[in-house]
């Protein structure tokens, strides 16, 4: 049976990779396309010191088990339950189709009013400071109106979201408490495949559940858990992770936090909290990445990211052959916008970036992450192949603005954004691979929607657009690629735009209107 990509939302999503279900929140939590960051001025977060690794490790044996580690780690893992209000379309009264009733009440369609419903989400979190800072997943708390944090000793506190970063699925929550048991942060870069790890969380609401496994892989990318614009560098583990584990701790044998559990591979077709469960493949955000995001949110009120300002994609074997390369390693530069750092440094379309500062990056996602974590103003040295010849290009990284982060129209993305009425809608060129994955006719031409911001006109105008839709025409003009799509949008009016869309094999027209 074909596996589907299960994302953290109740709406259907584009099938672009393996079947990924949220290892986390029980309940539906919509994915945001923009970063909602805290504004705490110059606050400082004081992390706890790590215990003596030798002392902890020496107390572990296969006869005694992992009890010494568990006893120290479990009190730092909390239960997070949140509530959010969503609007759904009310059911139409069947009598409204009767002309007799319509003369009194009007047409049935006009009587449909959005209904507010409360959705409940359940996940986990990790206390990282004695004064109540908690690391968790963005999808556990995103859009939450009320957050309840239950400690190991069954005390309850109201949680406040300090900030979130949807691109890494990291969130920071604060409770008003002191003297808490905090988990020391380890070093995820030191993890090796085969290392023992423990997953601690609240799967299915079962308090303080601990499972054991090994690190199955590191640096796992290409899962598209956070969409095409997410930053991925996952730790893969066979320690059992189930719905409700999201935001929980992945702990090493020294009792240190090495990852934040975030997703599971599930063969089921269920949504979050449904039938999908552990199949021995789970994913965690490395603590080094989580620490960096958390520190920036708490101390600066936002996540500062560097950018090249160019569009890159993974170099495939077919592309490598066309560019005369023996290996499909590196990132292919597809476009170099004018006045971007890459353009100013002399990067060109068709360049293949193999590494940075002497460090090889065979994966384009790893390259994107490394650049994003580089401080703006830093000059980096890119190892580039141009026309079959190696060379070095020095680029001064600049800061990705808040607007660029919110719109996702920035360097290193496969998707391309647009302005005007379609701002917030990301599209890609329709390739044979995407056509096959979407199970649509290869004769269909257009651009595929990869991301729709929930506060965009396209999302709020009842246009019924979804990720995976193929935009075939814009205002009666066929589009065959992203450039033609953007050209037609630039000619569109400000009030509305007419699209011809193929959705799951069905073609229809829809109008995106400006927000009133």
Image (cartoon, rainbow, N blue to C red):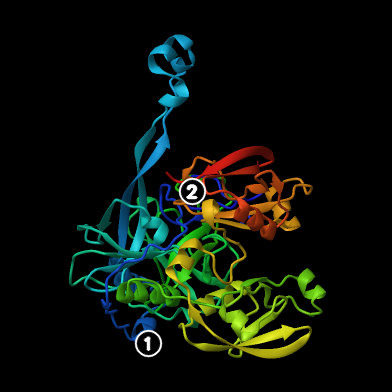
Q: Which residue is mark 2?
A: 457
Residue beneath the point at 34% across and 65% down:
163
x, y percentage for residue 321? 81, 74
- Identify which residue, 44 or 19, lies in the foreground: 44
Above or below residue 318? Residue 436 is above
Q: Earlier in the sequence, mark 2 or mark 1?
A: 1
Question: How many angstroms separate mark 2 from mark 1 (CA)?
Answer: 57 Å
Residue beneath the point at 36% across and 56% down:
141
x, y percentage for residue 245? 41, 58
Dot 2 alpha-carbon crowd within 10 angstroms: few under 14, some 14 to 19, many 20 or more:
many
Which quarter shows the C terminus? Answer: top left
Determine whether, in the image, residue 161 is placed left or right of residue 403.
left
Count how many numbered circles sit on residues in the image. Answer: 2
Using the rendered image of the protein, determine whether residue 119 is visible from the camera's viewpoint.
yes
Give the residue at the far top of this rendering.
100
Residue beneath the point at 39% across and 50% down:
204
- Identify which residue, 75 or 415, lies in the foreground: 415
x, y percentage for residue 76? 29, 68
Q: Which residue is mark 1?
A: 54
Label drawn at residue 368: none
Determine whether, in the image, residue 416 is placed left or right of residue 407.
right
x, y percentage for residue 4? 61, 50
């Amino acid at each position: 049976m074909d596996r589907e990509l299960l994302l953290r939302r109740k709406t259907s999503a584009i099938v672009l990779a393996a079947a990924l279900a949220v290892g986390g929140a029980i309940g539906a939590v919509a994915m945001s396309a923009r970063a909602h960051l805290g504004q705490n001025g110059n606050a400082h977060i004081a992390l706890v010191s790590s215990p003596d690794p030798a002392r902890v490790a020496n107390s572990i044996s296969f006869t005694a088990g992992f009890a010494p580690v568990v006893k120290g780690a479990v009190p730092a893992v909390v239960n997070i339950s949140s509530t959010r209000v969503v609007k759904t379309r009310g059911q139409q009264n069947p009598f409204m189709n009767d002309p007799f009733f319509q003369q009194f009440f009007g047409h049935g369609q006009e009587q449909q009013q959005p209904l507010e419903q409360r959705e409940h989400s359940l996940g986990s979190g990790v206390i990282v400071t004695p004064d109540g800072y908690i690391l968790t997943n963005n999808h556990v708390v995103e859009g939450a109106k009320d957050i309840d944090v239950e400690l190991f000793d069954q005390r309850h506190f109201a949680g406040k979201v300090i900030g979130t970063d949807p691109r890494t699925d990291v969130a920071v929550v604060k409770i008003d408490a002191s003297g808490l048991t905090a988990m020391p942060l380890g070093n995820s870069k030191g993890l090796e495949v085969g290392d023992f790890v423990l997953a601690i969380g609240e799967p299915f609401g079962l308090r303080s559940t601990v499972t054991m496994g090994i690190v199955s892989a590191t640096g796992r990318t290409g899962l598209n858990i956070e969409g095409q614009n997410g930053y991925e560098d996952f730790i893969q583990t066979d320690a059992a992770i189930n719905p409700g584990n999201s935001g929980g701790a992945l702990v090493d044998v020294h009792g240190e936090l090495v990852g934040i559990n975030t997703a599971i591979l599930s063969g089921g077709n269920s949504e979050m909290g449904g039938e999908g469960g552990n199949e021995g493949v789970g994913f965690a955000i490395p603590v080094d990445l989580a620490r960096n995001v958390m520190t920036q949110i708490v101390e600066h009120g936002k996540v500062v990211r560097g950018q090249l300002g160019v569009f890159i994609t993974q170099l495939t074997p077919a592309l490598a052959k066309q560019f005369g390369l023996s290996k499909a390693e590196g990132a292919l530069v597809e476009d170099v916008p004018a006045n971007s750092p890459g353009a100013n440094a002399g990067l060109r379309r068709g360049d293949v970036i193999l590494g940075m500062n002497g460090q090889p990056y065979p994966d384009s996602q790893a390259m994107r992450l490394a650049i994003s974590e580089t401080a703006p103003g830093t000059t980096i040295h890119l190892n580039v192949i141009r026309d079959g010849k190696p060379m070095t290009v020095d680029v001064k990284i600049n800061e990705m603005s808040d607007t660029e982060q919110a719109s996702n129209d920035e360097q290193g993305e496969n998707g391309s954004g647009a302005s005007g009425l379609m701002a917030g809608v990301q599209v890609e060129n329709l390739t044979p691979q995407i056509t096959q994955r979407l199970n649509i006719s290869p004769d269909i031409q257009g651009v595929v929607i990869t991301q729709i911001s929930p506060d965009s006109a396209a999302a709020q105008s009842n246009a019924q657009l979804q990720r995976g839709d193929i935009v075939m025409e814009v205002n009666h003009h066929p589009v065959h690629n992203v450039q033609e799509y953007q050209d037609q949008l630039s000619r569109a009016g400000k009030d509305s735009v007419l699209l011809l869309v193929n959705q799951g094999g069905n073609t229809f027209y829809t109008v995106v209107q400006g927000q009133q």
